[in-house]
Image: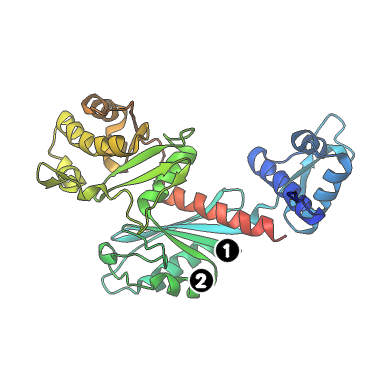
Amino acid sequence: MRVVKTATPAMARAINDRLALDLLLEHGPLTAPQLRTMTGLSRPTVSDLIERLKAGGLVEVTGETGEDRRGPNARLYGLVADRAHVAGVDVRRDAVNVTVADLTGRVVSEARTTIGARADLADLIAKVVGDAVGQRALDTVVVGAPGLVDPRDGELVSPNDVPGWRRGMMASVRERLGVPVTLENEVNLAAVAELRTGAAAGSEDFVLLWLDDGVGAAVVLGGRLRRGVSGGAGEIGFLEVGGVSFCDLVDAGVVRGLGRDELARRIAHGAFAFATLLDPGLVVLGGSTGHEGGDELAELVAGHLRAPTPTEVRASTVKGNAVLQGAVLTALDLARDHVFGSH
């Protein structure tokens, strides 16, 4: 006879606490009655979890609501946003950009520095992150960089695109900052931003075609990034079209001299490859070329795309630096799991 395991009291409390915290993240400050309605939990259970979260330094009274604005039912409970902070880092070929956000995702600081020819890149990254964070409590850092990230050790396989990058550098950055630091391919992080806040919101399956001074792609299937066994999923730049690499056809330095229709025809070759092999249903055009081309370019690409399955083409709608935004979103997921699970 199969034995069905039930949640222990401690496990049930942890589940209820995380449910309440996620609701506060989504909706902002809530009253105890609102939490009871949204969670379906009893009055005593909600009272207990509020006291636990207050004692753990995760929740605080932020004000009152209602006509009388008196009594425990009128108190608004919100997250203690500065309990922890995250940093998203975008490492370019010539610069390092950093965005720091609190636990709610509110951006509190930004910083940027150029990469000198003889700079120690690990020191430089740690310094610009430290300058941006200041005296705030830093929990997690996510770094985006061009190139393949080896899933075995989390390091760049071919770090030649960034001056001063060396194998094992992430370990040096972790040692200097003293917090968890995760490295991710830049286009994969941009895809996270498109999935959560951009053109792919509401779509669990899509490909982000990155068209910039580097050419690549990110694959999202079932709402999850697909990196491949060696981290090389989406390396569309190596695809040959008529004996020429796709990268050489649509690199930012090349497209400036092309008409819109010819550019769209070239981009359609890359979109066709993904539509044929993966049937994602959606291709998002990102990077500087995708942003600048906008809806007009997306429509032209769709017109040239002769895919065997229905495939929509959209322009990226993420405002600002998509890589940085994806890095912050990824870091927030990691930090919340850590902080919310350890109170």
**What is the number of the mark on residue 317?**
none
Q: Residue 159: horizontal and vertical position, in percent?
A: 29, 65
Provide the residue designation for mark 1: 138
Examine the image and state in which quarter residue 252 appears. top left
Q: Earlier in the sequence, mark 2 or mark 1?
A: 1
Q: Quadrant of residue 155?
A: bottom left
Q: Tell which residue pokes out farthest to the left in this image.
A: 243
246 relative to 162, above or below: above
Which residue appears at 30% of the width and 71% of the height?
164
Question: What is the CA distance from the residue labelled 2 to the residue labelled 1?
Answer: 9 Å
Quarter of the figure with residue 285? top left
Judging from the image, what secondary structure is the residue with disc 2 in? helix
Type of the residue with mark 1: Leu
Disc 1: CA contacts within 10 A as few (<14), some (14-19) or many (>=20) = many
Which residue is at 18% across, 32% downward? 265
Q: Is residue 141 left or right of 167 when viewed as pictured? A: right
* Res. 321 in view: no
The answer to whether the residue labelled 2 contacts the one labelled 1, judged by CB atoms less than 8 Å apart, is yes
Q: Indicate whether 24 appears above or below 157.
A: above
The quarter of the image holding the C terminus is bottom right
Disc 2 crowd, CA 10 A, few/some/many (<14, 14-19, 20+):
some
Q: Is residue 13 visible?
A: yes
Q: Is residue 295 above or below residue 76?
A: above
**Residue at the extreme front:** 1
Q: Secondary structure at mark 1?
A: strand
Residue 124 in the image: state x and y as whole percent: 39, 70
Tell me the number on the disc at residue 177.
2
Q: Residue at x 49, y 40 (%)?
A: 196
Q: Where's residue 154, x and y in %?
A: 42, 65
Q: Residue at x 59, y 53 (%)?
A: 102
Q: Amino acid at mark 2?
A: Leu
Q: Position of residue 29 (x, y in %)?
A: 72, 41
